[in-house]
Amino acid sequence: MYHFDYVVFIGRFQPFHLAHLQTIQIALTKSEKVIVGLGSAQPERTLKNPFIVAEREQMILSNFSLEDQARIEFVHIIDVYDDKKWVALVKQVVQEKVVQGSQVGLIGHFKDDSSYYLSLFPTWQLIELDSLQNSISATPIREAFYQGDIQTQFLPQGTIEFLKNFQRTPIYQQLQQQFLIKQPS
């Protein structure tokens, strides 16, 4: 028996790395379903957000068995730059997925200043995690990726395959050029 009906895990997953994988694995042991909130869900690509939601869904699911994939659902959370509006948006998209009266938890780790959002949902019980995988950060992984390096030591196999395929696209070439132009000489 699971403690929760649903556990919510919010992130940008740009890209999805081993600490993200471990967090979802833990969430799957605590709930019937895991709702992954894909932040920065607007359709335009940027250096900070190179992967659109459909790509991130594919990247994430590729790291799980079919049985676990069936227990993972996604919600899309656009950037609104106002905590009150953002919390309302997150609650709204999650409520569309959950059955009325369900026990909902929120899983995460207070990694840095950007993790304050975990305290914005007092009605959801927080499953606070210790630092996972030595606090991997997606930012240096992304920067190495733009330089042509896939840092496999920080990434699950499905993500590695996704990134290898993505490197063969014109979109990657464009993002890489943008990144290289912005680098100090």
Image (tube, rainbow, N blue to C red):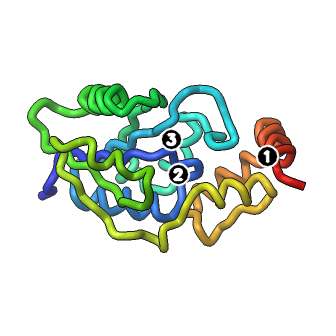
The tag earlier along the polypeptide, 2 or 1, is 2
The tag earlier along the polypeptide, 3 or 2, is 3
Q: Is residue 63 above or below residue 56?
A: below
x%, y% of residue 113?
Answer: 43, 54
The residue positioned 66% from the left and 40% from the top of the image is 50
How dense is the environment of label 1, judged by Cα within 10 Å: few (below 14), some, or many (20 and up)? Answer: some
Give the SS element for disc 3.
helix
x%, y% of residue 103?
Answer: 13, 44
The one nearer the camera, 161 or 46, is 46
CB of mark 2 within 8 Å of CB of mark 1?
no
x%, y% of residue 70?
Answer: 35, 45
The CA distance from mark 1 to mark 3 is 24 Å
Q: Is residue 154 above or below residue 30?
A: below
Q: Which mark is residue 179?
A: 1
Give the quadrant of residue 147: bottom right
The residue positioned 29% from the left and 27% from the top of the image is 88
* Whether residue 71 is visible: no
Q: Is residue 117 above or below residue 63?
A: above
* Whether residue 4 is visible: yes
Extreme residue toward the right, this view: 185
Which is in the foreground here, disc 3 or disc 2?
3
| Mark 3, residue position | 57
| Mark 2, residue position | 62
How dense is the environment of label 3, judged by Cα within 10 Å: few (below 14), some, or many (20 and up)? Answer: some
The one nearer the camera, 117 or 165, is 117
The one nearer the camera, 45 or 5, is 45
